[in-house]
Image (cartoon, rainbow, N blue to C red):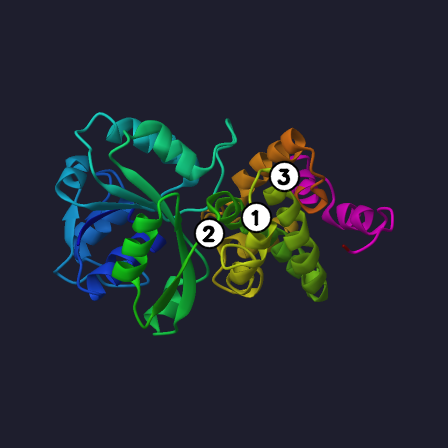
Amino acid sequence: MKITVIGCGRWGSFIAWYLDSINHEVTLYGRDNSSHMQRFLRERKNDLLSLPETIRLSTDINCITKTETVVISINAQGLQRLMNEIKTLDITNKIFVLCMKGIEITTGRRLSQIANDNLDFSNDVAVWLGPGHVQEFQDGIPNCMVIDSNKEEVKKLLVEQFSSELIRFYYGQDLVGNEIGGAAKNVIGIAAGMLDGLKLSTLKGALMSRGTREVSRLIRAMGGNELSAYGLCHLGDYEATVFSKFSHNRQFGEAFVLGESYSELAEGYHTVKAMLNLGKNYGVDMPICNAVYEILYKNKCAEDVLKNLFTRSIKNEF
C-alpha cells in the first residue's frame, strides 16, 4: 500500500517508521518550516527513532495525490486548517486515517466530522486510536489498538494491512464513542498528573473509575455506545495516559499544579473546553472535566477544587 503520513512529530514519525517496517511504501510529509522535518531532512532521526532510507521525505503537500492512503497525525485543533489545504488538491478515492485525539473547540466537531466535511464522497475516513508510546514500541513492547470507520470494508482493509506482532488491531464498532473516548482520556490524563503533583496518586483508581463513568454518560447522550468508554479508545489507554512517565498529558498536569513550565503538546488542555461544551449541549454533568477546567483556565486552587469534588452530594455508584 502506498501511504503518506502527514505530521512529523513523535507520533507521526513513529507511524511512518512502523508502516515502513511492515512493508508499505511510505512518504513522510512535514511543512518546510517545521523544525522536526528540517532535522529529518538533515539527519533522518529525532530523539526517539531513526527513519530508514526506504521512507521518502517531502515538504510538498501534493505528495498525497500519489498515494492510496493518507494518515494524519497533527495537532487536533489544526485539522481544519490542514483540510483547507487538502481540498484545493485533486483528491479522490483515498482513505484518510486520523491518528489524533481531540474535539474542535469552536464547533464541537469530532475529527472524522471535520475530515468528512471537507472531502468528497469518493474518499473514506477512519480513525486509529488506543494506547502506546513511541519509546515502548521502539523497545519492541507490543500493544493493542483500534481502527474504526463508518464503512466496514474500510475497517477490514486497514486492520488487515496495518496489523503486526507489534500492534494488534481490533475493529471499532462505534465511531462516536471511540472518538469521544479517545479525546476525553487526555483530560483524565491531566487530572491524573495533578493528583501526582499533589502527592495524591492513590486517588487515581477512583479517577479512572469515575472518569470512565463520566465519559460513558456523554457518549450515550451523543448517540454512541456507552461501553466504548470501557474499550481501547479510553479505559484501555489509561495505563499509557494516567500512569506512564511518557504521557504528555499526565506530565503537563503534574507540572501545572507544581507551577513548573511544560512545553510539549498536551491535547487535553484544549479538549477539556470542548468536553464541557458538549456536556452542556447534551445535558450531561461532567464534574471531573469541570474540575480540570477550573484549575487550568480559572486559576482555582487544585486542592480546593479537589475538596469540592469530595463534598459533592452522595449518590449511588451506578
Q: Identify the image quadrant of the C terminus.
A: bottom right
Q: Which mark is residue 225?
A: 1
x, y percentage for residue 192? 63, 57
Tag 1 secondary structure: loop
x, y percentage for residue 136? 40, 69
Q: Nearer the viewer, residue 26 or 124?
A: 124
x, y percentage for residue 12? 31, 51
Drawn side of residue 120 relative to residue 100, left or right = left
Q: Are marks 3 and 2 in contact (CB under 8 Å)?
A: no
Which residue is farthest front?
152
**Residue at image location 25% in from the left, 38% down from the top:** 33
Q: Nearer the viewer, residue 148 or 89?
A: 148
**Residue at image location 54% in from the left, 65% down from the top:** 239
306 in magenta:
yes
Q: Which residue is mark 3?
A: 221
**Residue at image location 40% in from the left, 38% down from the top:** 112
In the image, which residues are magenta? 290-317
x, y percentage for residue 131? 46, 61
Q: Earlier in the sequence, mark 3 or mark 2?
A: 2
Q: Identify the image quadrant of the N terminus.
A: bottom left
Q: Which mark is residue 173?
A: 2
